Image (tube, coloured by chain):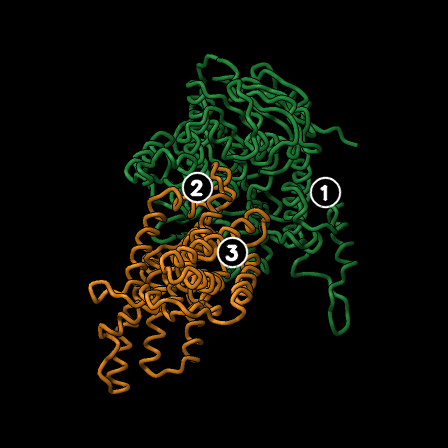
Amino acid sequence: MQELLKRFLPFISLLVLCLLIPLCEYFVLGNDPKFITAGNLAAIFRQTAVISIMAMGMTMVIVAGGIDLSVGSIVGLTAVVGSMSMVATGGAVLPGIAVAIIVGAVCGLINGTAITGLKIPAFIVTLGAMGIYRGLGLYISEGNAVVGLPQSAGYLSELNLLKVIPVPLLLVVAIALVVHFALSQMRLGRYCYAIGSNIEAARYAGINVWRYQIGYYTILGALSGLAGAIETSRTVTGQPNAGETYELNVIASVVIGGGSLSGGQGTVVGTIIGSLIMGVLANGGNLLQISPFIQKIVIGAVIVLAVTFDEYQRRRLNNAEG
Amino acid sequence: MSEKIPALEMRGIGKSFAGNQVLANVTLTAQSGEVLALIGENGAGKSTLMKILAGVHHPDSGEILIDGQRRNFERPADALAAGIAMIYQELSLAPHLTVAENIFLGREPRRGGLLKAIDSRRLNAEARRLLEDYGFRIDPQIPVGRLSAADRQLVEITRAIVEARRVIVMDEPTSSLTTHEVEELFRLIRDLKRRGLAIIFISHRIEELEEIADRMTILRDGVAVFNGDWGSISTDEMIRHMAGRELKEIFPPRQTTIGEVRLRVSNLSRPPVFSGINFDVRAGEVVGIAGLAGAGRTEVVEAIFGAQPASGGEIELNGERISSSSPSLAVDKGLGLLTEDRKRTGLCLNLSLSTNITLANVGSMLKNLRLQAKSELKTTQGYIEKLNIRPPFPAMPVGRMSGGNQQKSLLARWLFAGSKVFLLDEPTRGVDVAARSEIYREVNSLAESGAAIVMVSSDLPELLGMADRILIMRRGQMVAELAARETTQEEILKYAAVEEG
């Protein structure tokens, strides 16, 4: 019963929000509900796409018992490097996107290697990396936005497939399917849960723990690079400040979706719902004309609530073991 | 004498977790100045009953009386205030605090004045006096995290004794202690009896209870099936009460043909922990390793497995020299290590039984990168049946199973991994009698099928019953090799004991 509640709580919360917001619009503000229009829903997906993509990778890292605070900075760095490559090659967009993804993967690889090789807590390593990557992006771009990108750079975020489905949404769905499959049905995913549940037990079972851990960080890095490319596309410039504070939203998506910061728990479906909850909260807040500052407070409180609930569940289970 | 009010009475205690009845109408009495042995298999409800006494859990029904007074424990502090102290199986000390700080945690002697600062000098002096009184050789000023498991257990005991005024509960206090330390503990318990405390002693080792128990309560499936004086029934009857069935033979015989050498260890060393370790194990053979706690037995098998690599020496598997630098290499070569501490280095507690069983051989269930759920389920069900794992639910988190079933699931892991050489480190620690005999039966059938088995154990009857040869370690050295059939516990102890002074 408790477990069912835990599993469905994020989903129920999302449903409640989706009902509450249009009702408030209608009865409190006296407007026609804008929330449920196709345009608004598409906007929510578009706005949450970047966070969702990164949260897929973060789900792996968190399930494996790690964390990565540097993802927002990777977005900034790869936005700069990717768009510089586009400018340097005279407008080659696809290679530029590839550069962003590769640079992101390298950043993740470095994080993973430092964490496993130096045996330093992930929190500390990636806190440092957060400063390093952000500083690197600012240094390379001299603090200015990279301009002069071709118009086609905007396609990645603006284009709609069949005129209705935004490309970022398509990417989210594709990546979610792949990561879901990996986590639930591949060796990579099985080891992910095992390592997060008990890293020593995983090692004694003969799992090459460090190799897999580095892998999860690298995948997260690559996805953050893709996020950097999408951010570039949104503004058709390479902003060194892109992705600032994204790490918070990304981690919050995983945690609200049932991922446990102590590892061994978390699902792709949960994370998607988590990031939608965050997106709907922000969107609804705007529609209901709630100050964005208040929204920040609410989102912070939701994160604390989600972690509290997770802890409370764990304690109940531990006590019941007798 | 017989009409005195018991120090502790638990009447009609019932408790359910999530619809599972764990205890039903359990009654237990402990008199002042007596040792009550609480025995039963894992999962019989002993720990739950004691957690109710400690105020950790609340009973659904029943009442607790201390010296005839009805008491209600809302939280652990209430039980403590009523003079009840616990020594838990799982250690509950703060590793960064010193021995003395742990012993007096929450009751530190204070200096006068406004600040009421902790009086460290008195704290350390009192801790030192206590430890010396009890005959424990432990420096009160070093952090608990630096102590061995056995010493930590002794600190825990000391702390409980300081807290206890009426009742002291010891939940398998001897599992990590050496023979000598167990003697000290028993001396202490006799002293506590004289002081009028009621002692509840939980243990799996009947031989050990023989020495100190006055009365016993036997639990089976949450019901107290026997209450009476120690010695009023035979050991066989006790086992029958615990298991609910006859256990004809704990150590079944096996028919093996000893084959060629599977594992050869030459001059394996990691000073100062162990050095110059030489032995070999043949197909079909069970080789026991005996020794006191701290003799280096666990370290040797962990070195063979590559979990903590040795600094020198050679390991040959099936005549092929292997570099054992990591467990993943060892597992690839057909080694399996059933570790001494299943919660720390064995199980992923929140993951399912089937995930835990298949963890060391996930590759064999892959087809085009995809885990075959059906073959995993079938594999798991096969081992559930083969090893009689209870409850038989492949999707159940293994952390909710009893110690014996957890151990069986780990044995299943190495069976499924297709190991040829099994290193079993304390394979039956904290495992109940029924599960033990199932593990023994499986070890025998492994030997019969040509596997080579190394069995580290502190349980000498187990080694004598299971091993072909027994190697004895003392202070990191291999000091003797005895044929199990021709030796005795006394002879093994003579070699294993560390000369004092």
Q: Secondary structure at mark 1?
A: loop
Sequence-wise first label, 3 or 1: 3
> Where B463 falls versus B384 (above or below)?
above
Chain to which the residue tagged by mark 1 belongs = B
- Chain letter, orange in picture: A
Q: Does B98 sit left or right of A148 as displayed?
A: right
Residue at image mark 1: B136
Q: Residue at x 49, y 40 (%)?
A: A208
| Residue at mark 2 to residue at mark 3: CA–CA distance | 29 Å
Which amino acid type is marked by label 1?
A: Phe
Which colour is chain B painted? green
| Camera-side residue of B57 and A223 | A223
Q: Secondary structure at mark 2?
A: loop
Mark sitting on residue B65: 3
| Camera-side residue of A160 and B54 | A160
Sequence-wise first label, 1 or 2: 1
Determine crowd level at label 2: few under 14, some 14-19, many 20+ residues with C-alpha closer than 10 A. Answer: many
Chain to which the residue tagged by mark 2 belongs = B
Q: Residue at x 42, y 36 (%)?
A: B409
On the image, the x and y values in percent for residue B111 come to 77, 66
Disc 3 and disc 1 in contact, CB within 8 angstroms: no
Q: Is residue B67 visible?
A: yes
> Where A157 falls versus B218 (above or below)?
below
Same-chain status of marks 2 and 3 = yes
Q: Residue at x 32, y 37 (%)?
A: B376
Residue at image mark 2: B402
Q: Quadrant of the C terminus of chain B?
A: top right
> Where B350 falls versus B413 (above or below)?
below
| Camera-side residue of A297 and B173 | A297
Farthest left residue in view: A162
Q: Secondary structure at mark 3?
A: strand
Can you tell which quarter of the image residue B280 is in? top right
